[in-house]
């Protein structure tokens, strides 16, 4: 990969776009840490953990593009640093940038398990699968320090409640003991995100995630322990990884995944500026071609906000990607499917608990 401009290694974003919610604008232009010759080990760039004190933890999903009704996130911001992450745009609501701040200022919800238990034991609560997390990774490096994800899983098991985990970190294997118990009762699915089989590309796209080899091993280990695994080939970025759809599908099928899905890259809000800056620094020789293909798949823009279209794209490039995906799924996943969640166990458990009183 040709690299002509200074590049800040170890992080994804190279700039810090100004938060539109900040009342005080400190920099009229995005701060470019690489051009300022910073090193990510410098004090200004080290990860900072900030405690928050939410009153609720479960969020009702409003998007028609997401099939689950509820989601929860024990952390905000994500040190994985995936350059394409749509969740970057949530950080400005907290007064931080969607760029480098998203990766180095991690908001920690220490009371997440307590809030979750409070919700699940309510008489009015009806069991429904919870997407854990969906906005930032529940097994990002902060989890090693705080253990909030594990504490929440213990609550899901205590109340026999269904949960779907989403991660790209092999740290999920730490919790095999709980996941095996949940899966034995059809209460747990794990979705592993895999973007590429090219380790060099992974290091640029997702600098602090698990390696390609670790992720494939994670799919295999979870499967061998009876835990249903769904793999998201996501995002598909035209010009970077769309040619890998077949090889990625085969690799995860060979390791026991039960199903796959995909989404097209969607560079909404500040992510477009952050991604383009990153692309021109890491792959200047391919930048125009990649950006052109992304725009072609989104009606001439880097992002399409329309439900039903934004995650799949449209036009010839998007059609070719969809066809490749359909063929790969038909070839490698015929006869496989994810088991249905058990929604009855929680209600029975709650009824039994009430009888004690």
Image: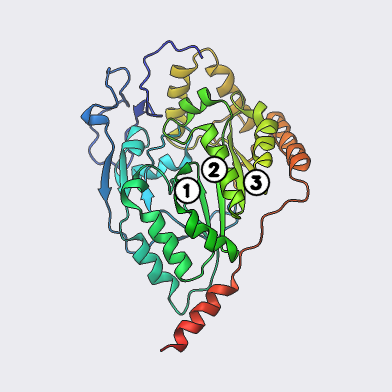
Residue nearest the observer in this picture, 106 or 184? 184
Q: CA distance from mark 3 to mark 2?
A: 10 Å
- Using residue 44 as the reference point, say whether residue 139 is left or right of it: right
In this rendering, the answer to whether 113 lies above or below 166 is below
Task: Please report the residue visible at 68 percent of the width from the left and 41 percent of the height from the top.
Answer: 253
Q: Position of residue 178 (x, y in %)?
A: 48, 59
Residue assigned mark 2: 218
Q: Secondary structure at mark 2?
A: helix
Q: Are marks 3 and 1 in contact (CB under 8 Å)?
A: no
Residue at the image point whose x is 74% and y is 40% from the top: 332
Observer-nearest of 241 and 250: 250
Quarter of the picture containing the C terminus is: bottom left
Question: Which is nearer the eye, 54 or 247?
Answer: 247
Q: Quadrant of residue 235?
A: top right
**Residue for badge 1:** 172
Identify the residue shown where x is 73% and y is 34%: 324
Q: Nearer the N terminus, badge 3 or badge 2?
A: 2
What percent of the width, then of the height, locates residue 43?
21, 30
Horizontal side, residue 240 vs residue 158: left or right: right
> Could you tell me residue 333's position as x and y percent?
74, 45
The front one of 145 and 194 is 145
> Where residue 47 appears, x then y in whole percent?
28, 37
What is the C-alpha distance between the residues marked 3 and 1?
Answer: 15 Å
Mark 2 closeness class: few <14, some 14–19, many ≥20 residues within 10 Å: many
User: Which element is circle 3 on?
Assistant: loop
Q: Is residue 203 above or below residue 58?
A: above
Marks 2/1: CA distance?
A: 8 Å
Q: Which residue is mark 3?
A: 257
Q: Residue at x 27, y 44 (%)?
A: 49
Vertical placement of residue 245 versus 153, above or below:
above
């Amino acid at each position: 990969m040709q690299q002509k401009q200074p590049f800040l290694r170890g992080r994804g974003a190279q700039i810090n776009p100004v938060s539109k919610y900040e009342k005080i604008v400190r920099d009229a232009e995005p701060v470019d840490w690489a051009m300022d010759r910073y090193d990510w080990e410098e004090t200004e760039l080290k990860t900072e953990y900030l405690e928050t004190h939410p009153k609720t933890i479960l969020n009702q999903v409003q998007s028609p593009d997401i099939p689950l009704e509820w989601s929860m996130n024990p952390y905000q911001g994500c040190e994985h640093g995936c350059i394409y992450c749509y969740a970057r745009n949530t950080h400005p609501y907290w007064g931080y940038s969607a760029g480098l701040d998203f990766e180095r200022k991690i908001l920690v919800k220490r009371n997440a398990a307590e809030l979750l238990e409070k919700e699940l034991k309510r008489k009015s609560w009806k069991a429904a699968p919870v997407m854990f997390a969906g906005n930032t990774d529940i097994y990002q490096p902060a989890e090693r320090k705080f253990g909030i994800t594990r504490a929440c899983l213990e609550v899901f098991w205590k109340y026999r409640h269904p949960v779907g985990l989403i991660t790209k970190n092999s740290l999920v294997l730490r919790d095999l003991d709980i996941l095996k118990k949940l899966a034995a009762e059809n209460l747990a699915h794990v979705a592993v995100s895999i973007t590429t089989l090219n380790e060099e590309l992974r290091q640029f796209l997702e600098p602090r995630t698990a390696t390609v080899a670790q992720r494939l091993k994670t799919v295999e280990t979870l499967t061998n322990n009876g835990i249903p695994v769904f793999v998201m080939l996501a995002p598909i970025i035209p010009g970077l990884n769309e040619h890998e759809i077949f090889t990625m599908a085969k690799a995860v099928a060979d390791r026991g995944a039960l199903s796959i899905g995909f989404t097209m890259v969607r560079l909404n809000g500040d992510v477009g500026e952050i991604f383009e800056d990153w692309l021109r620094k890491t792959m200047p020789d391919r930048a125009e071609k990649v950006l052109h293909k992304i725009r072609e798949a989104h009606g001439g823009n880097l992002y399409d906000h329309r439900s039903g279209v934004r995650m799949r794209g449209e036009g010839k490039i998007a059609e070719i990607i969809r066809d490749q995906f359909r063929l790969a799924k038909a070839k490698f996943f015929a006869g496989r499917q994810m088991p249905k969640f058990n929604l009855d166990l929680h209600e029975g458990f709650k009824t039994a608990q009430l009888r004690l009183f």
